[in-house]
Amino acid sequence: MNAELKKTAKSLRNASRKGGGDIWAALADELDGPKRRRSAVNLSRIDRHTETGGVVAVPGKVLASGSLTHPVTVAALSFSEGARAKIALAEGRAISLDTLLEEGFKPSTIKILK
């Protein structure tokens, strides 16, 4: 496991312990697992499961298959270049899981897609 991934998982777990909600622990658990078990989520799936202004966390990689028809904030471990471009085209945001935690989003507004 690389150092950046360890740091992210640790900060998510710490946020969970400080009463930030179970969502942070769930994301940390997903990141602590083996790499072969990490999810890859297509933009089409994100589009189906969100509404305008929604917030999504992906404990894996976001891929560019499909399109995004509304602006959403997508936090993930990594993004393909095409996914970043399509999210920006839909006027959404592609951010890291650390940034999601730092920006103080309410845990009840975040959906985990895997």
Image: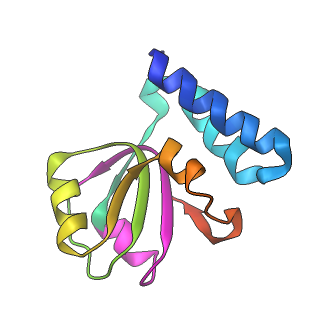
From this viewpoint, which residue is outermost toward the front? 103
Q: Is residue 20 above or below residue 52?
A: above
Q: Nearer the viewer, residue 19 or 28?
A: 19
x, y percent for residue 93: 34, 63
Q: What percent of the width, then of the height, locates residue 72?
A: 39, 72
Which residue: 50% across, 68% down? 55
Above or below residue 45? Residue 113 is above
Quadrant position of residue 73:
bottom left
Does residue 33 show up?
no
Residue at (83% x, 43% y) in the render: 18
Instruction: Tell me the quarter of the picture where residue 78 sits.
Output: top left
Q: Is residue 76 visible?
A: yes
Q: How many marks?
A: 0
Q: Is residue 88 left or right of residue 39?
A: left
> Where residue 45 sits in the image (x, y, percent)?
37, 67
Q: Which residues are the magenta region? A: 44-64
Q: How is the image coloured?
A: rainbow
Query: Image point 42% across, 27% down: which residue?
Result: 36
The spot of residue 67 in percent (x, y) is 21, 71
Judged left or right of residue 74, residue 109 is: right
Based on the picture, tell me whether residue 93 belongs to the magenta stretch.
no
Q: Residue at x 56, y 24 (%)?
A: 7
Camera-side residue: 51 or 41? Answer: 51
Q: In the image shown, does 85 or 69 lie closer to the viewer?
A: 85
For this view, does 9 lie left or right of residue 50?
right
